[in-house]
Amino acid sequence: MAQVKEYCVILTTCANQEEAERLARLLVESRLAACVQMTGVTSFYEWDGAINRDDEKLLLIKAPSASYGDIEAFIARNHSYDVPEIIQIPIRAGSKTYLKWIDTVTE
């Protein structure tokens, strides 16, 4: 029986457009991610005892689940935040042709 391949979306936020674009481009160029989408978000969080509100860029990184460890390490090495958000969300179902495309561009 063929092994079922798993896929995920990985979330991270960046302080600005330049950093977000740099990370997105490097993830795709290195073939770690098939696609990285970027959108603006407003984040509220506690840091160093203060409540903060920041406009950030959210990256939605589409990749094979097996690449998560490499992507986490890549983000940790290349991110400006001391503690960057790095969250994996499993893809439970998706278009077979889209998932096959992920395989094609990340191999």
Image: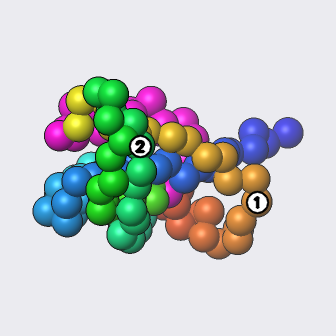
Under circle 2, the secondary element is strand
* Residue ID at (17%, 40%): 80
The vertical placement of 77 against 64, above or below, is: above
Give the quadrant of residue 20.
Answer: bottom left
SS class, disc 1:
loop
Question: Residue 17 or 22: which is nearer the viewer?
Answer: 17
Q: Is residue 25 visible?
A: no
Judging by the rendered image, the residue that carries numbered circle 1 is 93
Q: Residue at x 19, y 60 (%)?
A: 16
Q: Answer with left or right where residue 94 lies relative to residue 88.
A: right
Magenta region: 62-80
Q: Nearer the viewer, mark 2 or mark 1?
A: 2
Residue situated in front as seen by the camera: 48 or 101 = 48
Residue 5 as seen in the image, left or right of residue 93: left
Which residue lies under the disc numbered 2?
Answer: 45
Looking at the picture, which amino acid does disc 1 mark? Answer: Ala
> Where the N terminus falls, by quadrant?
top right
Residue 94 location (% of width, % of height):
71, 65
Amino acid at pointer 2:
Tyr
Kindly identify the residue that appears in the image at 39 percent across and 36 percent down.
Answer: 46
Label 2 to label 1, Cα distance in Å? 31 Å
Q: Residue 107 location in percent, x, y?
A: 43, 50
Q: Which comes before the other along the chain, label 2 or label 1? A: 2
Q: Check residue 68 for magenta coloring.
A: yes
Residue 71 coordinates in the image, percent (x, y): 38, 39
